[in-house]
Image (cartoon, rainbow, N blue to C red):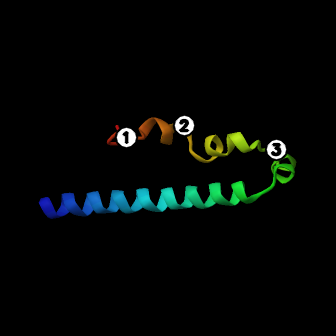
Amino acid sequence: MKKKLLETWIMRFLRFVHTWRAHRRIIKELNALDDKTLRDIGIDRNDIDKLIWLEFDKERRGTNGK
């Protein structure tokens, strides 16, 4: 039972790290663009974080996913 629980916790943690890294990579790529390019694709620099992290993600920060 404990082994299964540990495996589940490890898998959840690895998924979290994978998602976080993917989001960070996208944020860095968008931040590397100049303001004109961002405007051309319809993004304001101040909105990058809001666009990448879904509201659902923001609400779950610091919770156990409940």
Residue ID at (57%, 45%): 53
The Cα atoms of the two marked residues, 2 and 3, are separated by 20 Å
Q: Is residue 6 left or right of residue 24?
A: left
Q: Which residue is mark 3?
A: 42
Q: Is residue 6 left or right of residue 12?
A: left
Q: Nearer the viewer, residue 48 or 6?
A: 48
Q: Are the residues tagged 1 and 2 within 8 Å (C-beta)?
A: no
Q: Number of labelled discs?
A: 3
Q: Which x, y percent locates residue 64?
A: 32, 42
Q: Nearer the viewer, residue 56 or 21?
A: 21
Q: Are the residues tagged 2 and 3 within 8 Å (C-beta)?
A: no
The mark that comes first in sequence, 1 or 2, is 2
The Cα atoms of the two marked residues, 1 and 2, are separated by 14 Å
Circle 1 or circle 2, nearest the eye: 1
Q: Quadrant of the N terminus?
A: bottom left
Q: Quadrant of the C terminus?
A: top left
The mark that comes first in sequence, 2 or 3, is 3
- Determine which quarter of the picture holds residue 65: top left
Q: Which x, y percent locates residue 45?
A: 73, 44
Q: What mark, if any, has residue 55 been given in the picture?
A: 2
Q: Amino acid at mark 1?
A: Gly
Residue ID at (49%, 56%): 20
The mark that comes first in sequence, 1 or 3, is 3
Residue ID at (73%, 59%): 32
Q: Which residue is mark 1?
A: 62
Q: Amino acid at mark 3?
A: Gly
- Tag 3 secondary structure: loop
Q: Residues within 10 Å of mark 1 (few under 14, many from 20)?
A: few
